Image (cartoon, rainbow, N blue to C red):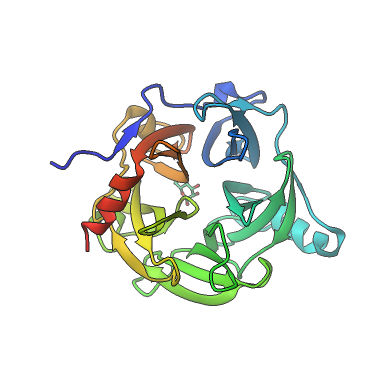
């Protein structure tokens, strides 16, 4: 058996419902960023007892011990888009009415953008917001039409355009869910959509979607993604890794055939939804390691680490 390239933090979970300053059913599927001053900021999916989903920010000096803010994130919208925003985010029809969830934090051209999902399975949309203080998130756009989710932004323009990986909701050339890419001149109007990758292996054969915002490396854009296996008793989520071409990010240039992170620990098996590991951030550190943040069992937030060169090698070996 191959050696695992991902190591879990031994004292996982790093954030649990009981750590939060308000009644909480679950806190998970977080996006994380490391600021230039070395602070780690985490935006988590926060489930109220009412089942309403909010976003809640926590902060840390070491990337391990996080202190939650006293209140959830405030989502605001400029007046010109407010009607569409409120109808989409606060009054949207679907199974998750009034829900905003699964935030990713994207540092794009030096500014912080949050990509997140609104609506339920049959009405989900991607939303983009911008923040400077991680207290207030200001609405930027709803890229693309409904039935898209899991968006992450590339940290810089490529060929003069912004780029976003996303997952159309359970629709694709293979009948599963694929990773797609779109580009935009301004982060508001999106198009130029094309398929990047579809499920290729058993462990991901129901669907794959972007997980962490892409990390630029000499070998290509490193993308941690999630893959879903249709188990007889539900679904199993795992994390995979692939490399995209630096100049043509719709081209896969390497992909690890095996999951790098898969359900093994009890806290990943027991929660609101069993058998889920759902990565949302990959933070490269100066010592060559990468912190991988992931939600477990739709209940708690966890941390694992890997070496950047081993993640790259795992993709390249596959070619
Ligand atoms: C997806 C999203 C994720 C969740 C996963 C497993 O559809 O809702 O937030 O972690 O299902 O339940």
- In this view, the residue farthest toward the left is 1
**Residue 192 lies in what quarter of the image?**
bottom right
Quadrant position of the C terminus in the picture:
bottom left
Q: Is residue 125 above or below residue 112?
A: below
Say which of 97 and 278 sits in front. 278
Say which of 168 and 12 sits in front. 12
Name the residue located 58 percent from the left edge and 38 percent from the top edge: 44
**Residue 23 lies in what quarter of the image?**
top right
Name the residue located 70 percent from the left edge and 35 percent from the top edge: 72
Q: Is residue 267 above or below residue 233?
A: above
Name the residue located 49 percent from the left edge and 27 percent from the top edge: 64
Residue 117 in view of the camera: no
Q: Percent x, y for residue 60?
A: 58, 28
> Is residue 175 found left or right of 194 in the rendered image?
left
Say which of 79 and 89 sits in front. 79
> Is residue 238 found left or right of 171 in the rendered image?
left
Name the residue located 64 percent from the left edge and 52 percent from the top edge: 110
């Amino acid at each position: 058996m191959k050696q695992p390239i991902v190591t879990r933090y031994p004292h996982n979970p790093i954030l649990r419902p009981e750590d939060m300053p308000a009644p909480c059913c679950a806190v998970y599927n977080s996006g994380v960023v490391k600021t230039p001053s070395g602070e780690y900021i985490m935006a988590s999916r926060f489930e109220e007892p009412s089942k309403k989903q909010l976003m809640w920010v926590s902060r840390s000096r070491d990337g391990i011990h996080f202190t939650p803010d006293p209140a959830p994130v405030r989502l605001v919208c400029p007046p010109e888009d407010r009607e569409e925003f409120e109808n989409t985010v606060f009054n949207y029809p679907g199974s998750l009415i009034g829900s905003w969830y699964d935030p990713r934090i994207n540092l794009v051209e030096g500014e912080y953008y949050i990509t997140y999902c609104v609506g339920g399975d049959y009405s989900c949309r991607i939303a983009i917001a911008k923040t400077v203080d991680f207290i207030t998130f200001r609405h930027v756009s709803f890229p693309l039409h409904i039935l898209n989710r899991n968006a992450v932004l590339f940290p810089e323009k490529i060929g003069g355009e912004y780029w976003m990986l996303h997952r159309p909701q359970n629709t694709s050339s293979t009948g599963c869910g694929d990773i797609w890419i779109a580009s935009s001149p301004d982060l508001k109007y999106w198009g130029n959509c094309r398929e990047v990758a579809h499920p290729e292996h058993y462990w991901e054969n129901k669907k794959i979607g972007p997980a962490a915002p892409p990390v630029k490396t000499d070998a290509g854009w490193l993308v941690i993604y999630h893959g879903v296996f249709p188990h007889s008793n539900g679904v199993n989520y795992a994390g995979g890794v692939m490399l995209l071409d630096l100049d043509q990010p719709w081209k896969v240039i390497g992909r690890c055939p095996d999951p790098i992170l898969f359900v093994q620990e009890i806290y990943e098996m027991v929660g609101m939804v069993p058998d889920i590991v759902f990565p949302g951030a990959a933070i490269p550190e100066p010592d060559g390691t990468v912190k991988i943040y992931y939600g477990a069992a739709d209940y708690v937030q966890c941390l694992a680490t890997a070496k950047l060169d081993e993640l790259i090698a795992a993709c390249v070996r596959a070619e």
